[in-house]
Every structure is written in structure tokens, then in C-alpha cells.
Amino acid sequence: MSELQMRVSDEDRERTAQQLQQAFAEGRLTQPELEDRLGAALSAKTYGDLLGLITDLPSTQPQVDDVVELASKNGNVKRSGDWAVPRRLRVASKYGSVELDFTEAVVPHQVVDIELDLTYGSAKIILPEGAVANVDAFQSDWGHPTSKVPSRPRPGVLCVVITGRAKYGGLTVRYPRRRWFTH
């Protein structure tokens, strides 16, 4: 699936609507053009739909961290502690495992899409308490996806959507382990 065919979130639609309103305020769009494009933006289903509405407008801000790709052939891919989470994260690992710990991460987006491409390794994703994860689109040939967190999106709560596949590994999504003897 190409990036232009990927489904958009409400936040993506809202950001595009704000860019269109800014272009109108700068005199780049007429009132009828704004109304037509806003209607299309608010009903858009894919990134291709949204991109078609703003390609003739100057970009208001660079989307540097919109998509981040992490790859490893033999080693492990690990992110933990204080790290910036992009809107979309693509992780490929041939022989190693993947561990993404979101508990101390900075997550500016309500919805984060993670696409996993694993051959022989497994993935572990640790979410902050209360976050939700949808693993329905993740496929594993020999292992299996295990999610110990709710999957139904809720307003104001981080929602992680995990897609992709593992040939000989699995996927585990959970909250942090509770520490018994800490003060």
C-alpha cells in the first residue's frame, strides 16, 4: 500500500483545513474555492485525497518528522526513554527484535501508525497506561499478535494502529510492568 492510499485521521483532516483557511486569509483562495476544498478535506479518506487539495499552496511548516523509517538487518531496533514519536513509524528488521517503549516518549499526535516488517524477530510495544492499540491489520505467519491493552479508540487517549507482518515472529503490545517493591 502506498502512502497516498493510507487512510487519514481526523487530525490530518483538521490540519489540512487549517492550511486551506490560512491560504484563504492570505488571498491565495477565493471564498468558493475555500468552501469546495474544505468540504473535500473534511470528507477525505486517504492522504492522496488531502494532498490533491493543497499541492498548489505553499507549505506552512515542514513535515520533517511525519514519517520515520527504522531498519536493521542483524541488530535490534529499540526506542525508549525520552524520544519524539512521529505520526507514522516504519520499522524493518530481518534478524533482530523490535522494542518500542512509549511510556516516557513525547507523542504529539493522538493517533500513531506503526508499520512493522519483521522476518525472524518479534516486536514488543509498551504503551503508557490508558493508551489503546489496534493490531487487527498485523499478520504473522508462525507467531501471533498478542495485545493486552484495549483496542477501541477513545477521545483524548493515544491510539496506536499497528500494521505489517512477521514471518517467524510475533507481536506483543502491553502496558509497563508494575514494580512491586518501589516507593
Image (cartoon, helix red, strand yellow):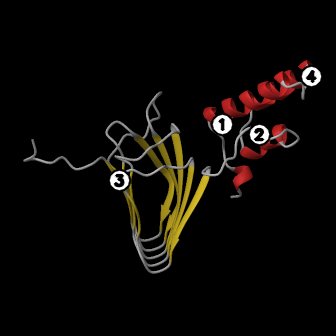
Query: Gap between marks 1 and 3, in whole Å?
Result: 27 Å
Q: Which residue is mark 1?
A: 12
Q: Quadrant of residue 15?
A: top right
Looking at marks 1 and 3 on the same chain, the residue that comes earlier in the sequence is marked by 1
- In the rendered image of this protein, does residue 47 appear above or below residue 76? above
What residue is shown at x 88% (from left), y 41% (from top)?
Answer: 56
Q: Quadrant of residue 171?
A: bottom left
Q: Which residue is mark 3?
A: 81
Q: Which residue is mark 4?
A: 30
What residue is shown at x 74% (from left), y 35% (from top)?
Answer: 44
The image position of residue 34, as x and y in percent, is: 85, 24
Mark 2: amino acid: Leu
Question: How many C-alpha atoms fall within 10 Å of the one at disc 2: few (<14), some, or many (≥20)?
Answer: many
- Contact between labelled residues 1 and 2, with CB atoms less than 8 Å apart: yes
Mark 4: amino acid: Thr
Q: Which residue is mark 2?
A: 50
In the displayed structure image, the side of residue 163 where residue 53 appears, left or right: right
Most foreground residue, 40 or 59:
59
The image position of residue 60, as x and y in percent, is: 74, 38
Residue at disc 2, secondary structure: helix
Query: Gap between marks 2 and 1, in whole Å?
Result: 8 Å
Query: Gap between marks 4 and 3, in whole Å?
Result: 47 Å
Looking at marks 1 and 4 on the same chain, the residue that comes earlier in the sequence is marked by 1
